[in-house]
Image (cartoon, rainbow, N blue to C red):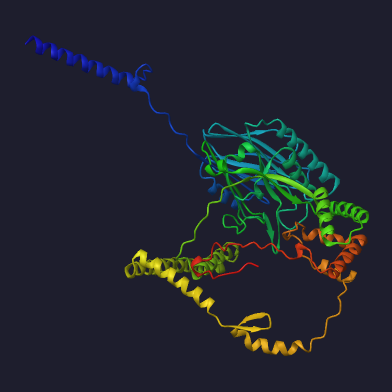
């Protein structure tokens, strides 16, 4: 009896002790090991920044933009809003910060950023001197981003130059005050060209971008491999790259991709294309950790730099008394490296090869292309009757493509199934090897005919007999002579903006030589000298051929090809 009572008492103490432990765990007693909980994992936050030159903000455009800002992780940046009188009322939950020009200013201008109210996202305006610069400090889940939205003048008057100078100086002062641990984004309508994006040469506003990239180590997102699309402005048959986005290295670590909507699938509300910048915070991008920084070289081929290039080249050619094409090429490269080369930095990424589905056919590709074309026409059409007709055609084509894909998948699966049924895996591979050996044997057993020291396939016999007859009647060709006129004619036909060959000399360098009488005379002398010499330069015997993979083309139907 006594022992039973002691046992029950000890069990009661244990229950009380257990209850105490549970209470301690609920109350968060740090001294008790049961209260420790595993640390929470970091949450990846997808953050998007949109930017477009809106060309006058209207109610219709506002409605479309507000539908995009459906959560607090999105900011919409607008240039040329023309909202001096602030006529538009925003929907509940949408906030804005803006910078507008004075009423007396004839030009509209206007910059604006829109975002949704949230405890997670905070957007605060920082006052600036220029009305064409909007500076905001954005806090998203304890991450701070400095955003500079700007608009540079398209004109070339003294007033425009002074306006842009104020913006440039103010931006540079802001950049210098931002430390390496803070993220920086500069974007907007620069109304400028940088030479290596688009077909226009570098201009005054483009020089500002290149200067910031070199001096402040900023990264141009437009030039990144993870940027989809090139042209940011298009009207009729004209198009160019005038809207840009630059980031510092801190923000680049969070950068995922940038999309330039050239097809206007998202918006058809301006002749500028929508730019979308996607970033991820509090998470690591594995591809970025594998990549390394690289210096990318490009050549500035504007008129002033090419004039300096020609002047320096003339001095070298005269001093060396050049008469061989190899010496000429060496001098051109040497001067180009000295006078024309510029560099910018970008991240090298590890490419992830994407295999195309084996059932993907040319018919599917054609159907998708037609569907996209109908969608584009539908979006751009202003006549409601025509637009309704295009909508019906688009939906019909969409159904046709879906059915076509299902049919191709079914056919492919049946084919694979039948092959497996007919052959075991080992037998299938053996048959493939036998087929390859058979084809090689056929190639070796082709009949060969001999004519003198030459060997030819038998199938060419009918062509060889007439050729041997003609050989007795051939008149020796006179020694050719290359003239100044021929050289200039050939140089004028060279196409600019093309890749250099193995010698590294771009077509623009040779075309620039037409401006120099000295360079043309040296070229004529070099070419005629090469004709006299039996051994030709190695650069004439080699070429650079790069195979461009047709990613949308089914590999199963790809034929053999040769690279010469």
Quarter of the picture containing the N terminus is top left
Residue drawn at the location 51% of the way across and 38% of the way down: 283
What's the residue at 53%, 49% (across, down)? Answer: 67
Q: Is residue 448 left or right of residue 159?
A: left
Q: Position of residue 277 (x, y in %)?
A: 59, 46
Relative to 30, does residue 459 appear above or below in the rendering? below
Up the image or down, 340 lies above or below 479; here it is: above
312 relative to 67 in the view: left or right:
right
Residue 64 visible, this orientation: yes
Residue 418 vs residue 220, the one in the foreground: 418
Nearer to us in this view, 216 or 398: 216
> Is the residue 207 above or below the residue 373 in the image?
above
Q: Nearer the viewer, residue 367 or 340?
A: 340
Residue 314 locus on image (x, y percent): 91, 55
Residue most toward the left? 1
- Percent position of residue 14, x then y: 21, 16
Number of numbered markers: 0
Image spot of residue 454 (x, y percent): 67, 80
Image quadrant holding the C terminus, namely bottom right
Q: Which residue corresponds to the image point at 35% horizontal and 20% vertical from the top-left? A: 33
387 to the left or right of 5: right
Frontmost residue, 250 versus 370: 250
* Residue 83 visible in the current orientation: no
Question: Quick one: which residue is furthest to the top in this view?
Answer: 2
């Amino acid at each position: 009896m006594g022992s039973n009572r002691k046992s029950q008492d000890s069990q009661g103490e244990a229950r009380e002790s257990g209850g105490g432990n549970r209470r301690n765990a609920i109350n968060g007693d740090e001294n008790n090991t049961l209260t420790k909980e595993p640390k929470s994992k970091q949450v990846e936050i997808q953050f998007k920044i949109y930017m477009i030159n809106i060309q006058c903000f209207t109610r219709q455009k506002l409605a479309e933009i507000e539908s995009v800002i459906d959560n607090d992780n999105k900011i919409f940046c607008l240039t040329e809003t023309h909202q001096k009188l602030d006529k538009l009322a925003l929907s509940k939950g949408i906030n804005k910060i803006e910078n507008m020009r004075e009423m007396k200013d004839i030009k509209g201008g206007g910059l604006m950023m829109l975002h949704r109210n949230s405890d997670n996202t905070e957007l605060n305006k920082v006052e600036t001197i220029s009305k064409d610069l909007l500076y905001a400090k954005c806090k998203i889940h304890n991450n701070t981003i400095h955003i500079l939205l700007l608009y540079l003048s398209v004109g070339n008057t003294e007033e425009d130059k002074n306006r842009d100078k104020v913006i440039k100086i103010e931006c540079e002062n802001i950049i210098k005050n931002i430390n390496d641990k803070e993220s920086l984004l500069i974007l907007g309508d620069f109304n400028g060209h940088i030479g290596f994006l688009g077909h226009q040469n570098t201009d005054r506003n483009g020089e500002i971008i290149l200067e910031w990239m070199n001096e402040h180590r900023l990264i141009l997102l437009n030039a990144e491999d993870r940027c989809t699309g090139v042209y940011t402005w298009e009207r009729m048959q004209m198009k160019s790259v005038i809207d840009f986005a630059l980031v510092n290295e801190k923000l680049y670590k969070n950068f995922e991709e940038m999309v330039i909507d050239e097809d206007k699938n998202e918006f058809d509300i301006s002749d500028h294309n929508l730019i979308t910048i996607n970033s991820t915070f509090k998470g690591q991008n594995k591809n970025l950790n594998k990549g390394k920084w690289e210096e990318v070289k490009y050549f500035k081929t504007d008129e002033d730099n090419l004039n300096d290039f020609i002047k320096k080249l003339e001095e070298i050619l005269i001093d060396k008394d050049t008469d061989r094409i190899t010496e000429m090429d060496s001098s051109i490269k040497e001067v180009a490296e000295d006078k024309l080369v510029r560099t910018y930095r970008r991240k090298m990424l590890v490419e992830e090869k994407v295999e195309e589905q084996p059932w993907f056919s040319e018919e599917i590709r054609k159907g998708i292309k037609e569907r996209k074309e109908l969608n584009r026409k539908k979006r751009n059409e202003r006549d409601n009757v025509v637009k309704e007709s295009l909508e019906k055609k688009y939906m019909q084509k969409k159904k046709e493509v879906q059915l076509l894909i299902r049919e191709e998948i079914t056919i492919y699966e049946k084919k694979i199934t039948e092959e497996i049924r007919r052959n075991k895996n080992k037998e299938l591979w053996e048959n493939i090897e036998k087929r390859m050996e058979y084809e090689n044997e056929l190639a070796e057993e082709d009949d060969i005919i001999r004519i003198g020291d030459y060997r030819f396939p038998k199938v060419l016999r009918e062509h060889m007999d007439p050729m041997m007859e003609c050989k007795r009647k051939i008149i020796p060709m006179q020694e050719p002579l290359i003239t100044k006129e021929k050289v200039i004619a050939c140089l004028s036909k060279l196409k600019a903006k093309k890749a250099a060959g193995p010698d590294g000399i771009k077509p623009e360098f040779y075309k620039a030589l037409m401006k120099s009488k000295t360079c043309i005379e040296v070229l004529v002398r070099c070419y005629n000298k090469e004709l006299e010499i039996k051994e030709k330069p190695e650069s004439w015997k080699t070429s650079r051929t790069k195979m461009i993979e047709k990613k949308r083309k089914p590999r199963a139907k790809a034929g053999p090809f040769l690279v010469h």
